[in-house]
Every structure is written in structure tokens, then in C-alpha cells.
Image (cartoon, helix red, strand yellow):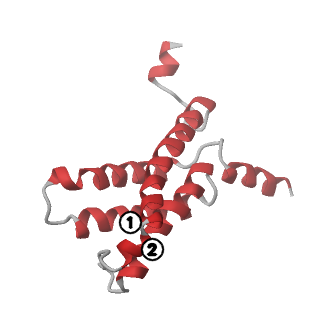
């Protein structure tokens, strides 16, 4: 038992998939809370929201809300998992490198932590407790 714990051979097993599910739910909800805050304060934020892509403050805010809210929802349930993570990773890259690029690390630490975590979860995949896993099983049966 200790050997299997220290040297797991099946990363797609139930234990790893449960950990991935917990990580998706916890960090998806945390990022989603930022998107909800932006969405509820859209009118106030739209005029002054940073525009690092040059598409206008309002549209930049819409893109941030999409990355933090809609993509987080897909991330949580594991639907189009890797595709949904691309805007999340991009949003954290913009926050870390552009918006807070000149700030002290303590200010940009949270986007950095999200960025690293999302990259690792992107590489790990959604696990077997995800919509993508069930869809893949359904498609293979046909």
C-alpha cells in the first residue's frame, strides 16, 4: 500500500481523478468568484478596465469575464476541458505579465499562482470524473 502511494503507476486512476476533480471545483470556483465580481460591477468597471489588447475597455472586460466565469464553469465540470482552459491561462498571463507586470511580486502573486496551477492542470487533463471522459467513452462505443 505504501509503495503504491509513493510510486503511483496509474495517473488516470480513481484517486488521481478525484484529486483532479477537487482541484477543478476548488480553483474553478475561486476564479469564478472573480468573474462574478466583474460581471456584477460591469457598468462601473467597463469605463476604466485595463485594455492590454487594444480592443476597448468594455470588450476587454467581457473577455476577462468569459475567461473567469464561463470557462471556469466548463473547467469545473470538465467539458471541453483543455479548450476552456486556454482563455483562463491567457487571462492569467495578461494579468501577471501585462496588467501587473511592473508591480511588486506580492501584488501579482495570485495571478502567477493561478497561471502555474492552470498550466499543470492543463497538462494533467480532466481525469475520469469529467464530462469529456464520459463523452469520449460514448463516442468510442459508436
Q: Which quadrant holds the N terminus?
A: top right
Residue 87 in view in this figure: no
Q: Is residue 12 left or right of residue 47?
A: right
Q: Which quadrant holds the C terminus?
A: bottom right
Residue for badge 2: 63
* Percent coordinates x, y for residue 134 in the rendering: 74, 49
Circle 2 — which element?
helix
Choose between 129 and 101: the one closer to the eye: 101
Choose between 136 and 19: the one closer to the eye: 19
User: In the picture shown, does residue 42 fall above or below 85?
Assistant: below
Query: Which residue is rendered at x = 61% and y = 52% of the image?
Result: 78
* Percent coordinates x, y for residue 107 in the rendering: 19, 54
**Residue sitting at the far right:** 142
Q: Is residue 115 left or right of residue 19?
A: left
Query: Which residue is rendered at x = 80% and y = 53% of the image?
Result: 138
Label 1 environment density (alpha carbons within 10 Å; few <14, some 14–19, many ≥20): many
Asked if the residue at tag 2 contacts the one at tag 1, i.e. Cβ–Cβ closer than 8 Å, the answer is: yes
Query: Which residue is rendered at x = 44% and y = 48% of the image?
Result: 30
Mark 1–mark 2 Cα distance, whole angstroms, equals 8 Å
User: In the picture shown, does residue 36 fall above or below 46?
Assistant: above
Residue for badge 1: 91
Q: How many marks?
A: 2
* Percent coordinates x, y for residue 8 in the rendering: 51, 27
Q: Is residue 34 left or right of residue 74?
A: left
Q: Is residue 23 left or right of residue 115?
A: right
Amino acid at each position: 500500500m505504501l509503495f503504491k502511494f509513493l510510486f503511483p503507476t496509474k495517473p488516470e486512476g480513481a484517486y488521481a481523478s478525484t484529486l483532479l476533480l477537487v482541484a477543478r471545483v476548488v480553483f474553478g470556483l475561486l476564479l469564478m468568484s472573480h468573474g462574478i465580481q466583474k460581471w456584477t460591477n460591469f457598468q462601473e468597471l467597463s469605463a476604466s478596465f485595463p485594455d492590454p489588447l487594444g480592443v476597448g475597455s468594455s470588450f476587454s472586460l467581457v473577455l476577462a469575464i468569459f475567461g473567469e466565469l464561463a470557462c471556469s464553469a466548463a473547467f469545473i465540470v470538465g467539458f471541453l476541458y483543455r479548450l476552456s482552459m486556454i482563455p483562463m491561462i491567457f487571462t492569467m498571463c495578461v494579468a501577471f505579465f501585462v496588467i501587473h507586470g511592473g508591480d511588486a511580486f506580492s501584488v501579482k502573486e495570485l495571478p502567477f499562482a493561478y497561471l502555474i496551477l492552470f498550466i499543470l492542470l492543463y497538462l494533467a487533463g480532466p481525469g475520469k470524473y469529467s464530462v469529456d471522459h464520459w463523452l469520449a467513452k460514448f463516442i468510442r462505443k459508436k
